[in-house]
Image: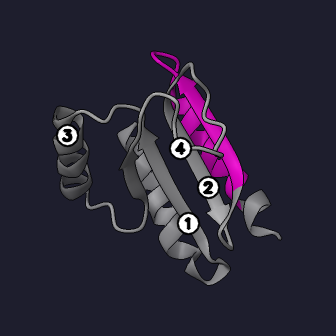
Amino acid sequence: MTGLVKKVDEATQKNRKSEMGSFVIFLDKSDEMEKKVKDFGDKQGIKETVLALDNPAGPKGYNISKEASVTVLLYSGRKVKANFAFEKGKFTATDVEKVIKELPKILED
């Protein structure tokens, strides 16, 4: 997870002119998770990627998978261009590369 967030954050910084944005939603609104996510962002030096908490259903209108334990959205021009959902225990280094490889596609518009 750390590798993905850091790579997405770096890509978001590099693509500011394309109005690229990114955020990671943790589907757990507990006080404990809020502290963990804040500490994670601070420790890893996350600058552009928004780290968010939401209920298990996710934000209304974002079509977050109910089975996902982690969802990564990449957007440009305030429009979501890619939505990646990872079930608990099924997130791998290959998935990190899959997300990063999508960046040129979403920045073409």
Q: CA distance from mark 2 to mark 3?
A: 22 Å
Amino acid on which the number 4 mark rests in the picture: Pro
- Tell me the residue that label 1 is attached to: 21
Amino acid on which the number 3 mark rests in the picture: Lys
Q: Colour mode?
A: one colour
Give residue 36's mark: 3
- Which residue is at 56% across, 18% downward? 67
Secondary structure under badge 1? Answer: strand
Query: Which residue occupies the extreme right position in the image?
Result: 109
Amino acid on which the number 1 mark rests in the picture: Gly
Magenta stretch: includes residue 80: no
Q: Are marks 2 and 1 in contact (CB under 8 Å)?
A: yes
First of labels 4, 3 by sequence position: 3
Secondary structure under badge 3? Answer: helix
User: Does 83 sit above or below residue 91?
Assistant: below
Which segment is the magenta one?
Answer: 81-103
- Which residue is at 45% across, 15% downward? 89
- Tell me the residue that label 2 is attached to: 74
In screen coordinates, is 62 left or right of 42? right
**Position in image of residue 58 (x %, y %):** 51, 37
